[in-house]
Image: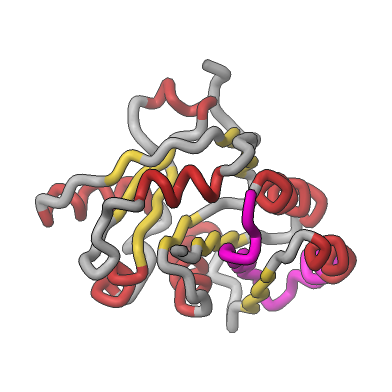
């Protein structure tokens, strides 16, 4: 069974982030094959403390939490640095560049991703896209996934903070179509209800 990694950069919104994280944990069918990688700034003791408080509940769901502290604060301007750091500290076969305000509302989302990627060759690089249901109006995907092989070749998780645009442009350049994944998500910070 392919292991899924979710990387979550977050900064000093512990309550909102814990809600987001729990939405993924509770809606997964098998947390033993998922790792949740949380990337924090070195001064974000609030989120670190909140994660410590929910650790026992996470164990009840067989959750593997990996907390990575960045050496410095990159800020939103260098979001890709956090995603790369999280991916370097992960072991999953399929990596989803999640965000701290992306809530999962799909029970069994992990099985859906595995089912949708079962015919893909994990020995070759591939990348994929996900669109939250309240961002369908945009006409393009705003969330990126890729396999371990992609990361081994590229060495980073995106060349700019606009990771979705970066991957689309890179995909065009490489003549590499994205895999269109479907899992129901809500981006709580922005968007329109569709």
Which colour style is shown?
Answer: secondary structure
Vertical order, 54 against 128 (above or below):
below
- Is residue 46 visible to the viewer in this orientation of the structure? no
Stretch in magenta: 29-51
Corner quadrant of residue 80: bottom left
In the picture, measured across the screen, residue 111 lies left or right of residue 49, that is left
In the picture, measured across the screen, residue 127 lies left or right of residue 145, that is left
Q: Nearer the viewer, residue 37 or 157?
A: 37
* Magenta stretch: includes residue 92: no
Residue at image point 47% right, 56% down: 96
Q: Position of residue 48 (x, y in %)?
A: 79, 70
Q: Nearer the viewer, residue 178 or 113?
A: 113
Vertical order, 60 against 85 (above or below):
above
Residue at image point 25% right, 46% down: 178
Q: Position of residue 25 (x, y in %)?
A: 69, 53
- Is residue 150 visible to the viewer in this orientation of the structure? yes
In the picture, measured across the screen, residue 124 lies left or right of residue 133, that is left
Residue at image point 67% right, 74% down: 67
Residue, far front: 1
Question: How many discs mark residues in the rendered view?
Answer: 0
Residue at image point 48% right, 56% down: 97
Vertical order, 45 against 171 (above or below):
below
* Magenta stretch: includes residue 43: yes
Q: Position of residue 34 (x, y in %)?
A: 58, 63
């Amino acid at each position: 069974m392919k292991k899924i990694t979710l990387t979550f950069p977050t900064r000093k919104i512990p309550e909102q982030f814990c809600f987001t994280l729990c939405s993924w944990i509770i809606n997964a069918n098998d947390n033993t094959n998922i790792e949740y990688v949380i990337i924090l700034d070195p001064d974000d003791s609030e989120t670190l403390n909140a994660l410590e408080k929910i650790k026992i509940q996470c164990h009840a769901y067989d959750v593997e939490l990996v907390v990575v502290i960045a050496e410095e604060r990159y800020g939103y301007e260098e979001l890709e640095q956090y995603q790369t750091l999280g991916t370097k500290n992960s072991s999953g076969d399929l990596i989803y560049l999640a965000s701290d305000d992306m809530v999962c509302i799909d029970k069994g989302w992990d099985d859906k991703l595995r089912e949708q990627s079962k015919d893909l060759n994990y020995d070759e690089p591939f990348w994929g896209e996900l669109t939250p249901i309240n961002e369908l109006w945009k006409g393009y995907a705003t969330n990126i996934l890729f396999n371990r092989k992609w990361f081994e070749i590229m060495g980073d998780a995106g060349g700019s903070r606009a990771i979705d645009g970066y991957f689309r442009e890179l995909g065009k350049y490489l003549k590499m179509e994205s895999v269109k994944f479907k899992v129901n998500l809500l981006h709580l910070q922005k968007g329109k209800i569709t």
